[in-house]
Image (cartoon, helix red, strand yellow):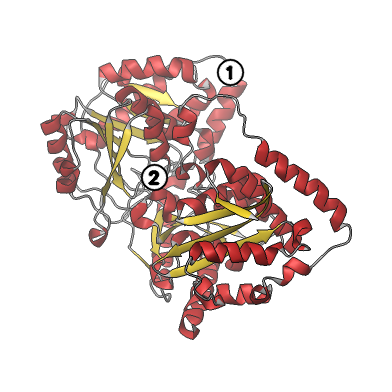
Amino acid sequence: MDYRTASEGDLPLLAELNQQLIHDEGFPNPMSVIDLENRMRGWLVRAYTAVLFLIDGSVVGYALYRNDDRGIFLRQFFICRGERRKGLGRAALDLLFGRIWPDGTAVSLEALCANEAAIAFWRAVGFEDYALTLRRRAPGWRERDASQRHRLRSLARARHMMKFASIVNRLDTPAAYAWSIHDNARKRRDKGEDIILLSVGDPDFDTPRAITRAAVKSLESGRTHYGFFAGEPALRQAIADRHAALTGQSVSPDQVVICPGAQNGLYTVVLCLAEAGDEVLVPEPRYVTYESVVDASGATRVDVPLDVERGFHLDTGKLEAAVTDRTRVILLNTPHNPTGMVMTREELEGVAEVALRHDLWVVCDEVYAELTFDVPHISVCSLPQIADRSVSIGSLSKSHAMQGWRMGWVVAPPDLAKHLINLVKPMHYGLSPFLQDAAVVALTEPHTETEEMHREYRARRDLVCSRVNAMPGLACSWPEGSMFLLVDVRATGLDGESFAWGLLDHGGVSLLPGTGFGASVTGHVRFSLTSPLAVLEDACNRLERYARSLATLSASA
């Protein structure tokens, strides 16, 4: 028997082996191979090592473990069922132990496991006897093993692939798989499991009825043909008027470009401002997709840590210290996702000074502009001294519960707006006129529903923050805006990823691990305030039970 360290190219093979492990052990609700591949990729990113065991060049099993200053934690160990009868399980573990402890140090179960729960799991499956699972056989295992081994070995040999553009590699980052837990939770809920989904910012409110009626009326009137590339004139005017009211700075409708969501707006802006060799400064933690947006342009993202002790507010001194002769753009987000921080005028003035001194663009994602609690939102575009270099990105998704309508926009200086229009022509060729007609109603008419949404979000924030801060091992800052809060789980002894998956498996609540938001919050999870108060109360009860179970395990360890 031989072994080798698994690489990125082995992820499909590892996922197949992981699925076979789940099947053989009879674990409920197995994930798809794609989900398993994404989850395995996340583990490898978080300092786990995967080792493949081979016989005559063919893969017969694997192990996944972590070796750090806390000790060694063996997360998964698997030998293909057909190979177990040959005693290869013991040989594989001996190889693994020799790899970890080349000096032949004796190995105990406690030395391999990071906590009491892990020790109990491995004892339950007979780990101390090199796994009782190695001796268990189901009817027809010989016939099934032959086909399974053939498929796995074929996959291991299938290394030839068609060539792709380099952008696919730039986008194949951990951020691309940040929602794996949400996808898994959603599938499990659809199959009937009792799971509360709080892992995405998808408001539970319906779009105000007047807006929906306007869309239906426009649709029935025949507004189903191609629209203007940059957006319908009435909508561009409505957004220009809104921008003037929000910032005190007048803009022409020609400076407004309509996009299918703020995400697309941000993508088009960054493509027009940055390229290979450039740098984009991004306060971190940051929204998950910012990583992919900057990577797609070919530019380099430079994270600027936010001040955790000051409620995740930006230190403009740190921002300026990160500027180099390659810096082209500062990318802001206020109100902030995932922390709920709202930038002050003083902070924005500081950013403006940095931008002027170093001739930089300032791009601000302001999709939560109308959702603040304790401090008002101030747009970066309200600062006249950087009017020629500031860009605002907005949307109706959060303010009017229109997330599925994909209705966003960019307000930019005139020259940039012209370049954006040239880019959106081949990108989406304009948006549906009947949807834009409804967006005009959203922006120009009052809606009592939006006022109720705001009151409800405040009540939800107050409930969840009060509950979380009273739970053992958990803590959170009170968000000043948006619909999220970050929960610090480090005192439980787990990182955010392990905590989130454990909560999903044992508590039926799906929260988003902090991993995708940046290195500073890998010990956090993001809690979305996107369900009614009664559901959030239930979610908090489940969260507290899980937190207390971890505290009990820690105390007994």
Q: Which residue is drawn at the image coordinates 33% and 26% (left, top)?
A: 276
Q: How dense is the environment of label 2, judged by Cα within 10 Å: few (below 14), some, or many (20 and up)?
A: some
Q: In the rendered view, would you say 355 is above or below 74?
A: above
- Please tell me the numbered disc located at residue 287: 2
The three-letter amino acid code for the residue at tag 2 is Tyr
Disc 2 to disc 1: CB gap under 8 Å: no
User: Tag 1, which secondary structure?
Assistant: loop
Q: Is residue 235 visible?
A: yes
Q: Is residue 29 left or right of residue 2?
A: right
Residue 300, located in which quarter of the rendered image? top left
Residue 232: give x, y in percent of width and height. Answer: 43, 19
Q: Position of residue 508 (x, y in %)?
A: 60, 64
Indicate whether 109 appears above or below 83: below
Asked if residue 116 can be seen in this view, the reply is: no
Q: Which residue is mark 1?
A: 224
Q: Residue furthest bottom?
A: 556
User: Residue type at mark 1?
Assistant: Thr
Neighbor class of circle 1 (other Cα within 10 Å; few <14, some 14-19, many 20+) is: few
Where is residue 93, by image quadrant?
bottom right
Q: Earlier in the sequence, mark 2 or mark 1?
A: 1
The structure residue drawn at horizontal position 84% and vertical position 57%, both measured from the top left corner, is 141
Q: Nearer the viewer, residue 462 or 540?
A: 540
